Image (cartoon, rainbow, N blue to C red):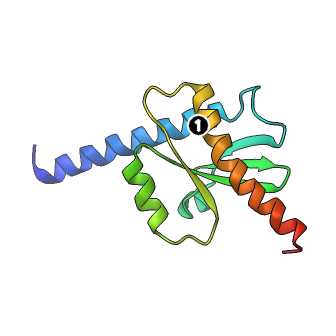
Amino acid sequence: MAPRQLHRAFGTIARDRGRASEQRVLDACVLAGRPPWMRTARQATPAEDHDGIDVVIESDVGKLYVQVKSSRGGKAAFEERRRRIRAVVVVVAGGDTPEKLLRKVVGQLAALRAQFLSERSDGG
């Protein structure tokens, strides 16, 4: 296989893996065991996706954004870039159950939600 074809094939594999991971997180975010402050979850719009968002959680403090990665390296690279929106990054492992993914998302979002609540109480 020529280098260009190989590059294209790896890109397709990575894109498909990413979409599958995003869907797994989305499925986890609508489990009955989610906290009451997580009202709904949906896939990001194309405009949101362009800003580095994969999943949008409607919560009691407004929209909370999730970026889904399949590796710690991908997470680190994403976090190095400055973003204008505050999004949490969740790394999805192959063996993660839906319940484990929900715990990962809730753990990350709870900290971001606490920041928003603190800013509200500080008048910011």
Most foreground residue, 35 or 118: 118
Q: Residue at the location (65% across, 43% down)?
A: 107
Residue that numbered label 1 is attached to? 25
Q: Under tag 1, what secondary structure? A: helix
Most foreground residue, 43 or 68: 68
Residue found at the far left of this picture: 2
Q: Residue at the location (17% across, 54% down)?
A: 4
Quarter of the image with the N terminus in it: top left
Q: Residue at the location (83% across, 43% down)?
A: 37
Please say whether residue 56 is visible from this viewpoint.
Answer: no
Q: Residue at the location (18% across, 46% down)?
A: 6
Q: Where does residue 98 sit, x and y in percent of width and height?
A: 59, 27
Quarter of the image for residue 61 reads bottom right
Quarter of the image for residue 12 reads top left
Q: Residues within 10 Å of mark 1 (few under 14, many from 20)?
A: many
Quarter of the image for residue 119 reads bottom right
Most foreground residue, 20 or 79: 79
Q: Amino acid at mark 1?
A: Val
Q: Where does residue 47 sit, x and y in percent of width and height?
A: 61, 62
Quarter of the image with the C terminus in it: bottom right
